[in-house]
Image: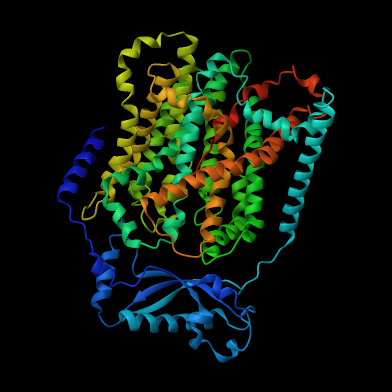
Amino acid sequence: MKAISLILLHLLVCQCSGVIYKLNDSDFSRMPPVFHLDDYDHCITNPDGLYCSVDIDVVSDTGSELYSMMKTYSDYNRKHFNHTSLHYGICVTHTCKKFLPINAMSKTLNNTGDLSNTDLQLVLETCLNESLWNHYELKTKIAAPIYCNNIEEQVKDGGHLAVGVFLLVLLTMNVIGTLYDAVFVRGQNRAGNNLLLCFSVPHNFSRLINPYAKLGPREERLKVFHGLRTLTIMSVIFCHSLLPFALAPENVHYVESLYDNIMHFIFLNGTVVVQTFFIISGCLLAYKLELYAENHEINWTLLPKILINTWVKLTPSYMVVLAVTATWLGYAGSGPFWKIAVMREVDDCRIDGWANMLYINNYFDHTQCMVQTWYLASNMQLYILGYVTCILIKRGRCRKAALILLFIVGIITPIAHTYFQNLDAVLMITPETARSFMDNPTFNHVYKRGHTNIFNFVLGIALGFLIYRLQTNEVNMQKYKKYRYLFLLTFPAIAGSMFIGSVFYLDGTSTSIYTKAIYAGLIKPLFGIILAILIIGCVFKIENVYRTILEWNGWKIPGKLSYCAFLLHIALVRIATGSLRTLVPLTNLRMIEITIAFIVMSYLVAIPFWLLVDAPMTEFLQKLLTGSLCQRTEETKEVPDNNIALMNNLKMIDTEKGNSRL
């Protein structure tokens, strides 16, 4: 806490005395625009049209005063774009027509043999050099790679065919299951076959609109997690839906000016909110194990069953989204940013998708394959750690010692990474983050690794044990109601924990590596402890303000859909971004409009996905594992399955799994 206080003092001092380099509108307009797009549709409607997206490095060999100003301004990269690195969409056959070789002009450019990549780079450099020299007396150098439409045709292979056949079979099973349920089961009021009912839309719809209907009174007190999970997933989608503004903003100067409003730093440091999922997951893991242990013996033989069941609950829908991303997503649209926003992910998923299925993708860097699912990998790894700790270590003192050791590891690992690798104290959401996040060392080494997120998962486990003990021993928590006003401070405290990270965005300040390392090690525990206090206040009805909001029954259905929304939202954002034809003007109202649209769209798309993919495949695999597929509904209705009972609410735990996202 002393370190946090020092950071707050440092923040106040820097805010009062720091000098931030700025440009007025007149000087800013002297620089070439960072982003520019030629008319895409007009270009590609021409049979010979060639449209390319290029990254341009601005250079000068004349000691240009303008270039020096651009370099100095860009050096403040915490708040400014790199104005010496331009991102242009060029209609080569129109803008650079006079620089094309005659033999290339005489033929269609759809054939890669007509214009090699080397020739194309030379044409673009010559063309852009003339333009920038005439207007700014600057020169350019093309940074590879160059992404062009109509140079490479997407080739369908066996993977496309396999995924297409699988989706067709899945759709057919849903049609058959729905008709069977409607005609032979509901229509004749008779028992149904479990296999076919797994794929019945009415059957799954009833599960959707009546989620968590069989919870006991003690489990019901954890319904605060419905609101926490849904609101956190919405926050994740909110942040990720800003990608179009980061990748193709029209008013660059306005985007940079947003960093001068200190209130925006709460959102910039909002990445710590993802820790909510780890706390929920750890808490429910411990709590459900304790409930299970009331009537069953827990031993090591339960471990593989639980892990397999966990994998089955998470993987089917994840696998479908991954397969579609690696194959058919590339055909969902086109645009100047299509290869940057969409095809990079498609290509990476074809190469690295296997790591996602093994839940180790958070230890693979420089890949854009479903980046938000780093959380699923990290959460699965922590699940294994948590189950091993809680199942194999049974003695109370030994278990406490193990949890304390994990707490220490959870604090030390971010400190060690930050100190020895000279990383940022937080994941810096700079203007350039959208293009370079996969190469960001802080994101790769601290943010997404499993071992750097241990603390709050273990805190969740401790919280689950605590809640269970307090309920079992019938401890009178109402005596703490006199402190309810202190519980009301938890939300401002959470906002404050995010706000203090703004010190690392201030220009003209030099933060020592010791300060950054200490902050990196303490910020997640600080956030987690505050949130744990809020959860305790809600579970035991100590306060009634936040509890009323978070326990609203309206959160149950979107909570059930949260995992699907989490898996799908990045694809929707990428498709929308890749399909842009113009640069995006950013205003506060426009930003709110687009983010709300993506949140609503993600949940709307999640409904049919849950009904047709997630629910039927998960139920089918679970019943396959328990051997109940061939039984009739009435025969299995009263047959308890210990493993299913234990994991009854696992999906409620897991994403809820959200980054991921991200």
State the image coordinates of residue 630 (x, y, percent, origin top left): 83, 28
Q: Is residue 405 visible?
A: yes
Q: With 78 as the anchor, is 381 left or right in this view?
A: right
Query: In this rendering, is residue 159 above or below 122?
Result: above
State the image coordinates of residue 517 (x, y, percent, origin top left): 31, 44
Which residue does the image show at 79% across and 36% down from the upper left?
177
The answer to which quarter of the image holds residue 558 is top right
Query: In this rendering, is residue 495 above or below 341?
Result: above
Q: How is the image coloured?
A: rainbow
Q: Give the total of numbered labels.
A: 0
Which residue does the image show at 56% across and 77% down from the upper left?
50
Is 214 or 465 nearer to us in this picture?
214
Which residue does the image show at 34% across and 84% down from the upper left?
134
Q: With 2 as the anchor, is 139 left or right in this view?
A: right
Is 104 or 357 nearer to us in this picture?
104
State the image coordinates of residue 529 (x, y, percent, origin top left): 37, 28
Which residue does the image show at 68% across and 35% down from the upper left?
615
The answer to which quarter of the image holds residue 380 is top right
Query: In this rendering, is residue 576 above or below 397?
Result: below
The answer to which quarter of the image holds residue 410 is top left
